[in-house]
Structures are given as structure tokens and as C-alpha cells.
């Protein structure tokens, strides 16, 4: 498994809009429909990546912990399903049902390109005006490094939005498998 870091996406950048299939309910939805009053967290993930599998329980827990916070969570898979069929919509649905938030399919990969997403997981947090406040890792845990999965970095970024404070923590890039481009 090749390690890839997330690329630079300027803080303050407005979240690119999209219309994507929500694999959980088979409805096409837009960012504007899904955004939260206080903020929106967008997670580029997939079903097969060992880095995503490693944090899956925390991704599910985030959905539970922030369900009524005013910060909405969105997961997106942009992988090429020709080479990685397990990342296709028919397999995403059962995974997405565990999240408690939308799991969207980016078939054209246009959304991943617009966000400059590079790896899975690649995590973004936007404020209520859809301005980027965080782009980085979930936490310091990686498969095999024996660091517990806590979600401390993404939780801090989301908590700052809820509390109306500035995230002063250093934003470390996410590390994972590369997005599987067409």
C-alpha cells in the first residue's frame, strides 16, 4: 500500500459545489442541501483502503457524536470502480448506512479534482459559510503504528466550529492510499 499525503487546499477557500448520488437512499443531493448551519465536514474515503478501514469505527462514532451539533458530515468515494469495484455504489450503501450521514458517489471524479483530494482518507471542515477551516488528518493513528484511533484532530476542528473559536492546532496532512483515478 502506497502512502500518499493530502495536498494543499488553502484555508478560507469556499467548498466547491456538487450534485452527487447518495448511495444510502439513492437520491442525488447537492452540497447546499447537505451543509450544516455551523459547518460541514467532508471526508473523501472508500470501502477498501486499509487506512479508511483502520478508522472506520471512528467515522461511525463521529456520525453519532455530531448528529445534532449543527455540523453535518458527508462521506464521498471518488475511486475508479473499474479497477476497484468494491468501492462502487452497490457496496457503499451498506457501509454508508452505518455512518448516519450521507455516503456519496463521485462517479466522474470531478468533485475529488475540485477539492484537490489526493488520498483516502482526505478530510475537510468548512464553516457555516462553506469556507475551509481545516484540511488534514483524523489523528496520528495509522495501520500498524499502535497509536489509538481517537479522531482528536478532526474532532478539535469540528468542536472549534461548534464553539465559534479559531482552530489554533497545527494541521497535519492526512495520509492514506491514493485515490484511484481513471
Image (cartoon, grey):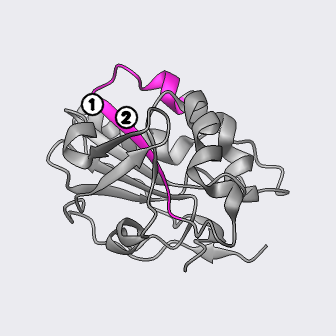
At horizontal 62% and vertical 76% (from top left) the residue drawn is: 4
Decide whether residue 69 is among the magenta residues: yes
Q: CA distance from mark 1 to mark 2?
A: 6 Å
Counting from the top left corner in percent of width and height, residue 20 is at: 35, 52
Which labelled disc corresponds to residue 163? 1
At horizontal 56% and vertical 49% (from top left) the residue drawn is: 89
**Quarter of the image with the C terminus in it:** bottom right
> 86 or 48: which is nearer to us?
86
> 127 or 82: which is nearer to us?
82
Q: Quadrant of residue 57?
A: top right
132 up-or-down from 65: above or below: below
Counting from the top left corner in percent of width and height, residue 106 is at: 44, 60
At horizontal 57% and vertical 74% (from top left) the residue drawn is: 5
Are discs 1 and 2 less than 8 Å apart at CB?
yes
**Residue occupying the far left of the picture:** 129
**Residue occupying the far top of the picture:** 68
Q: Quadrant of residue 84?
A: bottom right
13 up-or-down from 89: above or below: below
- Answer with left or right where residue 53 lies relative to residue 64: right
Question: How would you rate the neighbour count of disc 1 (Cα within 10 Å): few for under 14, some for 14-19, many for 20 or more?
Answer: few
Magenta residues?
62-78
- Answer with left or right where residue 131 lies relative to residue 49: left
59 up-or-down from 80: above or below: above
Which labelled disc corresponds to residue 159? 2
Q: Quadrant of residue 60?
A: top right
Amino acid at each position: 500500500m502506497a502512502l500518499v499525503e493530502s495536498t494543499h487546499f488553502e484555508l478560507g477557500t469556499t467548498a466547491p459545489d456538487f450534485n452527487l448520488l447518495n448511495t444510502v437512499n439513492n437520491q442525488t443531493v447537492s452540497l447546499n442541501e447537505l451543509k450544516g448551519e455551523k459547518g460541514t465536514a467532508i471526508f473523501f474515503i472508500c470501502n477498501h483502503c486499509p487506512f479508511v478501514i483502520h478508522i472506520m469505527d471512528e467515522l461511525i462514532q463521529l456520525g453519532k457524536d455530531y448528529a445534532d451539533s449543527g455540523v453535518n458530515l458527508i462521506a464521498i468515494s471518488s475511486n475508479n470502480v473499474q479497477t476497484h469495484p468494491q468501492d462502487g455504489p452497490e457496496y457503499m450503501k451498506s457501509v454508508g448506512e452505518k455512518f448516519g450521514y450521507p455516503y456519496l458517489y463521485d462517479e466522474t471524479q470531478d468533485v475529488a479534482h475540485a477539492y484537490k483530494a489526493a488520498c483516502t482518507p482526505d478530510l475537510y471542515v468548512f464553516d457555516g459559510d462553506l469556507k475551509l477551516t481545516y484540511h488534514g488528518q483524523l489523528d496520528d493513528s495509522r495501520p500498524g503504528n499502535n497509536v489509538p484511533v481517537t479522531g482528536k484532530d478532526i474532532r478539535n476542528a469540528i468542536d472549534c466550529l461548534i464553539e465559534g473559536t479559531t482552530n489554533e492546532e497545527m494541521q497535519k496532512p492526512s495520509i492514506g492510499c491514493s485515490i484511484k483515478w481513471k
